Image (cartoon, helix red, strand yellow):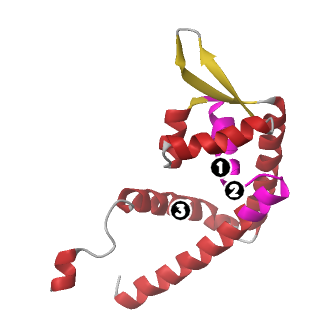
Amino acid sequence: MDLEDIRHFRETMRQLQRVLSWQSKSDAACCGITLAQCHVLMEIGKASKISIVDLALILGLDKSTLSRTIDGMVEIGLVERLSNPEDRRYLKLTLTEQGKNLFDSINCTFDQYYQDVFAAIPPEKHQQVAESLSLLAGAITEKSSSECCREEELTS
């Protein structure tokens, strides 16, 4: 791709990021939880039971930051910590009944939202869009640890 195409692509990505960020924040807020809590809730709900260590890896957070979020979710009755009888230091997280209900509600909301989004895309392009987004997400994930501007590039 030439520089003009790359810049157009970057602008499109920024627009997409803004729209998705706003959508996620507003959906989480309308459910009475923060965006961070929403991400935690969705990952625990998807896994059914998960350790804090595994959840931190999935979300790309450190354990202390994640623990504070989970503490708040335990306090409001969305998450419960289950101890392992063989190793009391090893905890699993699971959703309470209230947490499961909220997980189901958020899933229904987003399922409907994305059904509506796909309804605005020609049906013959659905697979192409899904495949392209999967490729893009994989490439971004792979490159997410790279530096924006390398020092040797700046000196040339």
Few, some or many residues within 10 Å of mark 3 (<14, 14–19, 20+): few
Q: Which residue lies at the image location 34% right of the left edge and 73% below the top edge?
A: 148
Residue beneath disc 2: 35
Q: Position of residue 50 (x, y in %)?
A: 58, 30
Check disc 2 and report its element: helix, strand or loop.
Answer: helix
Residue beneath disc 1: 39
Query: Residue at the bottom extreme?
Result: 4
Q: Which is more N-terminal, label 2 or label 3? A: 2
**Mark identifier at residue 114:** none
Check disc 1 and report its element: helix, strand or loop.
Answer: helix
Q: Which residue lies at the image location 82% right of the left edge and 42% below the top edge?
A: 102
Q: Position of residue 52 (x, y in %)?
A: 55, 34
Q: Position of residue 54 (x, y in %)?
A: 50, 35
Few, some or many residues within 10 Å of mark 1 (<14, 14–19, 20+): some
Region rendered in magenta: 25-49
Residue 82 lies within the magenta run = no
Q: Which residue lies at the image location 61% right of the left edge and 18% below the top edge?
A: 83
The answer to whether residue 78 is visible is: no
Do the numbered discs 2 and 1 sit on residues whose CB atoms are within 8 Å?
A: yes
Q: Is 147 left, or right, of 47 in this rendering?
A: left
Q: Position of residue 146 (x, y in %)?
A: 32, 64
Vertical position of residue 130 compared to residue 22: above or below: above
Vertical position of residue 66 compared to residue 83: above or below: below
Amino acid bearing label 3: Leu
Circle 3 or circle 2, nearest the eye: 2
Residue 33 lies within the magenta run = yes
Few, some or many residues within 10 Å of mark 2 (<14, 14–19, 20+): some
Q: Which is more N-terminal, label 1 or label 3? A: 1
